[in-house]
Image: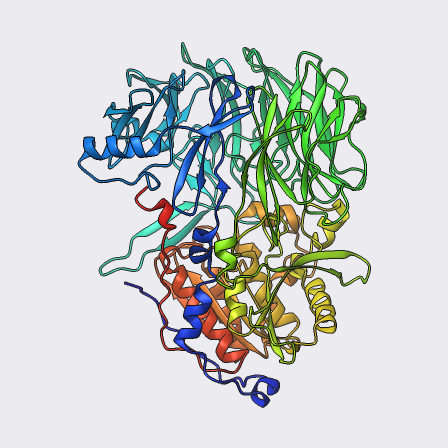
Amino acid sequence: MHTYFPGFLAGALLVSSVALAQPQPAVTAQDYARAEQFLGYNTQPLVDGSAGPPTWLAGDRFWYRVLTARGSEFVLVDPARKTRTVAFDPAKLAGALSAASGTAYAADRLPFRDLDFSDDAKGFAFAAGGKSWNYDIVSGKVSPGAKPAAALNANASNEINSPDGRLAAFIKDYNLWVRDTNTNQLTQLTTDGAKDYGYATDNAGWTHSDQPVLRWSPDSRKIATFRQDQRRVSDMYLVTTNVGAPKLKTWKYPLPGDSVIATIERVIIEVPTPRVVRLQVAPDPHRGSLSDDISSSGTFDDVDWSPDGSQLAFVSTSRDHKQEKMRVADAATGAAREVFSETVPTQYESGQGAINWRYLPKTKEVIWYSERDNWGHLYLYDATTGQVKHQITKGNWVVTKLLRVDEQRRQLYFLADGREPGNPYFSHLYRIGLDGKGLTLLTPEAGNHQVVLSPSGRYFVDTYSQPDKPGATVLRAADGKLLLTLEKTDISRLTATGWKPPTPLMVKGADGQTDLYGLLFTPTTLDPARKYPIINYIYPGPQGGGVGSWSFSSARNDNQALAELGFVVVVIEGSCNPLRSKSFHDGCYGNMAENTLSDQIAGMRQLAQKYPYIDLARAGIWGHSGGGYATAAAMFRYPDFFKVGISESGNHENRNYEDDWAERYIGLLQTNPDGTTNYDNQANTTFAKNLKGKLMLAHGLLDDNVPPANTLLVIEALTKANKSYDLVVFPNARHGYGIYSPYMMRRRWDYFVQNLAGAEAPHDYLMQPHPDPRNAGQ
């Protein structure tokens, strides 16, 4: 049952005079149903030939699952032989499994997605119907398997397996333990962990879980982790909404300007005979070089073991992200030395989506990522002297992910954006020598390339496409030579419904010079002679943009669905966002309240000149999280341009948002002699009195990412200024609203239809999300 507060304190603000002058007919439930057909859960099931990620086997063989018009199939690939075959006879397996389980299964709708192949690839294990099974490909027989490991160990999701798979590390009572995966024998590794002073604990303010943050050594004999000290860190409090006494939710959540933040005391733990080696460095701030967490890449960030486990390289990040210190520690003694450091005037980052520095102990070198020449590039350092040997990559383009270092051939494989003509956000794979010579493009097709290297590095799987053009998945050799075309994305069933892709766009930024890129969504029934309100979907970053992936997608949020209701929807990647130059990304540093809004307005004005059917007098905007912050800022700072806004879960007051994000992009909180601070003008409350249009605010009251006080402060400011607004509250929802997301989408459609188009919306239309039938029951 949906539990919510209906929009209240609704304003008496008038719809724009233009909207009143052009009354629109009612939008019906049938119109909403048609628009709903353009949402992802209706469009994605009509896309065929989409290959899942490869799962590698011995000898660089791999299998993947591909979705077809009828269901799915499993494919086995042998790169050495250049063969692509079905992994097994699905009809034979379906029949055997149906007989063994007593449940009927179809060959193209098998009830599983994952396989665990035997070493000889002649059979595999899988789970179906809550049980585990084994399948012999040669005989075609299905037999009961061992009980799934997850059933034996309820804590499996919170464990980190060693490289050899024999041990699994986990947290118990603030200490680190390991479990023998064969015998389930438990061994305690640390003994002095305590509440708020435990080992490997995961807490960055906005993210917290029971999974440990650590990095196993390659030989599975040591663990690099930390003891996190947050004993004096401030708490965040939220309460549940329920019948009876509410339950208090409390966790550590430092804020900008706090005198104490979470720190980590780095340790190395020897596993066979448990011993804790404490690194001889002062505690580091709970910070990472990639983002505002120390495990954002999925593991313990900014640490790199030597192959023999004798040394641990690590990077320490200052509280304000302005200084990085590259260090190397002796794993046996904990002695650590500083190799070099880099200090920047704004904020340092080590790449986009991946940490790009590497320690090369054999040659006593360090590959380092820096934006010192205004572009993200790789440099080679002498690990003995700490001096730069030379710059490896150069040019007006950005290295995003260093994927492989071939030390023997002294070559690097990396993804980079902006080197090839066209859209600078398209990613390609390159190879270059450590000496900076021999730069080679390995993925020549125009588009955004997503690459997965084989374990040996001899091959890679390349999936490429463009936002408006479906692509393909191919197998290539390490030199880029095309070996096999594995799949081609087929959207014929999708286009038969009347679907059309968005239109890529390029406009100039507010400076009149910088090229900005984005996507334009228009109704499939567009009438060029008609005037359409325009809606700006915004996510201003600065850690990412509104477009998200630049690969093909059958739906992006509800952008096309909104367009079908009679709007033009635009997404523009403004300056202040990543994947371009350092100066481009730093465009809003210290002034996050800019939110790329001047770029958005400049771009929308250019689009209106190019497409006369765009009605700038009826401009709306919406966004979630950082986009919610930007939406309210747009309504308050540009009240004569934006007429309707929907602000969801916004971090409107960054003094009330976790310490790391704001201190990274705004700087440390500083109080001036007159009592003002550098954060005052970043707060939406300061400008709430300027509201003229219609504004809807939404927030989940159990939001542990952006606490709901952020929106409540805006409500208080609007009330004091006697401004009307609308509000949707989800009492027990977190940041993304969860099961209430369809309801929020419907309210969003209603709000724009009523207040921007000046039409009547259908009453309480019910969104009906559903899984892709090809994945049903899995």
Viewer-side residue, 485 vs 143? 485
Q: Position of residue 607 (x, y in %)?
A: 71, 69
Viewer-side residue, 77 vs 31? 77
- Which quadrant of the rendered structure holds the N terminus? bottom left
Q: Find residue 202 and report its image quarter.
A: top left
Q: Is residue 424 above or below residue 214?
A: below
Q: Residue furthest left?
A: 102
- Residue 723 showing in the rendered view: no
- Residue 591 showing in the rendered view: yes
- Which quadrant of the rendered structure holds the C terminus? top left
Q: Is residue 113 above or below residue 359?
A: below
Q: Is residue 636 above or below residue 207?
A: below
In the image, 645: left or right of 2? Answer: right
Q: Is residue 47 above or below residue 609?
A: above
Q: Find residue 636 and report its image quarter.
A: bottom right
Q: Position of residue 423 (x, y in %)?
A: 72, 50
Viewer-side residue, 183 vs 132? 132
Q: Residue furthest bottom?
A: 21
Viewer-side residue, 61 vs 413? 61
Q: Find residue 572 and report its image quarter.
A: bottom right
Q: At 58% from the left edge and 65% from the top edge, which residue is drawn?
A: 631
Q: Position of residue 314 (x, y in %)?
A: 61, 25
Q: Position of residue 677 (x, y in %)?
A: 65, 57
